[in-house]
Amino acid sequence: MSARRVVVVGYGMAGSRLAEEIRRRDRDGERTSVTVIGAEPHPAYNRVLLSAVVAGTMTPESTQLHDAGWAAEHGVDLRLGVSVTSIDREARQVALDDGSTVDYDALVLATGSQAWVPPTEGLQTDDGSLAPGVATFRDLDDCAAILEHARPGAPVAVLGGGLLGLEAARGLAGRGALVTVVHPVGHLMERQLDPAGGAVLARALGEMGIEFRLGRFAARYVQGDGLKLDDGSHVPADLVVVSAGVRADTALAESIGLTVDRGIVVDDSLRTSDHRIHAIGDCANHPMTVSGLVQPAWEQAEVLADLLTGVDPAARYRGTPVVTRLKAKGVDLAALGDVHAEVDGDAEVLCLQDPVRGRYAKLVIRDDRVTGAIVLGSPDAAATITQLYDAKTPAPTDRLGLLLGRALSSAGPVAHSPADLPASSVVCRCNTVTKGQLVKAWRGGAATVPELATATRATTGCGSCTDAVCGIVDWLARA
């Protein structure tokens, strides 16, 4: 039998991971031939690390997910710097802007998302391009544009106080820019935080020199001057970085008649309304998924690789319980589950506020299980609460001790050291790597953090698990 032809449109974090997972299951290409089409000229890279590129602590090359020879070594037909012009669903053929065509048996759309630019006067020119002195924060080209204009001591305005906007702000502040974040909501990260938590986060980030204009809209941008806000006030800016949200890139899907609703609608098999076409990552709309995060995209890639190679025809994607992390110098934030719950007949809601020390904790418990939490400035508590959330085990009766990170679970002690951590505990959420997998890889010869990263992919996502992996390595070396 000839190999099944799989074509992946998009060589970002979702598309590159899918190609990798397919080759993990079908190393010799006997079951599948894989063609990946990437519009960007770069090899695949980790977008989560772009703030480090802006800050100058990482180079663009160090964010790459694959080296230049990966595709050839793994039998993947990688086509960079080309775009899809049309798809013929009846003939199952993809046409590219270089004049070539590619036939498929299964087509995967991993087209990602695009930065949304608000309709603020002056941000865009008449042809829709960004005005001089304005940049989005979405890819490596954006980073290059930002670094071209950002100077130490120069004023920079960031539009957007969500996760991406704050990542951009802290990267620019790390480079010495004078950053002001303009956000239309009254508190930061409103999707993941409540007002009290957002206020503590703003105070902590303010100690880095970042200023905030909350509950304000940008009304007008004037090149070389800055932003005029809706209350008539002014924010000086040599550069405006727009990080006001993203929109799923569904143009290609819409052009061929697929069902779209704020994303390409997919089922648990990640099939679109055309069952020979799948979608994963930011462009896909699955009812149990939060878009814009890496963990769901990579879990979807694993499920789809099982299906496309036939390794596990019963594989299904059921959604991802997401933990949002923001880590910067002096700031450690974790938010998970239902953070906006209020006290009712079914929910316990406990809060601990210590804004002077940059600490805030909110815990939501239903049926004695953790169903939501915000933990800022208490990494031990965050680790304990995340363990309970992942395992769905009963919460300790000492709720205050849990908020402080020193409680005992009714099922036994909650782990604070690698020795106590259960083998099933997820250490790297982005790649769903457990302590047991790390121990197995270490016993197989991966004795350092870089070697464990190569063997398991731990630490290669957002990087927030690096300290935990280092602790496990130290523990194993002493054991």
Image: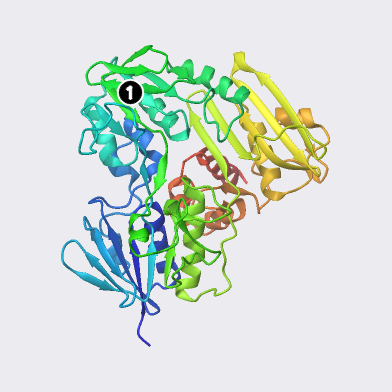
Q: Nearer the viewer, residue 392 or 230?
A: 230
To which quarter of the image does residue 174 belong? top left
Tell me if I can see residue 352 in this picture.
Answer: yes
Residue at the left extreme of this rendering: 99
To which quarter of the image does residue 279 belong? bottom left
- Identify the residue shown where x is 55% and y is 53%: 432
- Identify the residue shown where x is 55% and y is 51%: 289
Image height check: is 284 above or below 242?
below
**Along the horizontal axis of the image, is 27 left or right of 423?**
left
**Along the horizontal axis of the image, is 172 left or right of 162?**
left
Tell me if I can see residue 456 in this picture.
Answer: no
**Along the horizontal axis of the image, is 206 left or right of 320?**
left
Residue at the top extreme of this rendering: 233
Percent position (x, y) of residue 351? 71, 26
**Along the horizontal axis of the image, is 284 left or right of 428?**
left
Percent position (x, y) of residue 207? 48, 15
User: Is disc 1 placed on a helix, strand or loop?
Assistant: loop
Image height check: is 143 above or below 72?
above
Image height check: is 123 above or below 263?
above
Q: Nearer the viewer, residue 380 or 452?
A: 380
Disc 1 target residue: 175
Percent position (x, y) of residue 128? 24, 38
Work out which quarter of the rendered image holds the N terminus and state it: bottom left
Type of amino acid at the residue the image marks with label 1:
Arg
Q: Nearer the viewer, residue 258 or 470?
A: 258
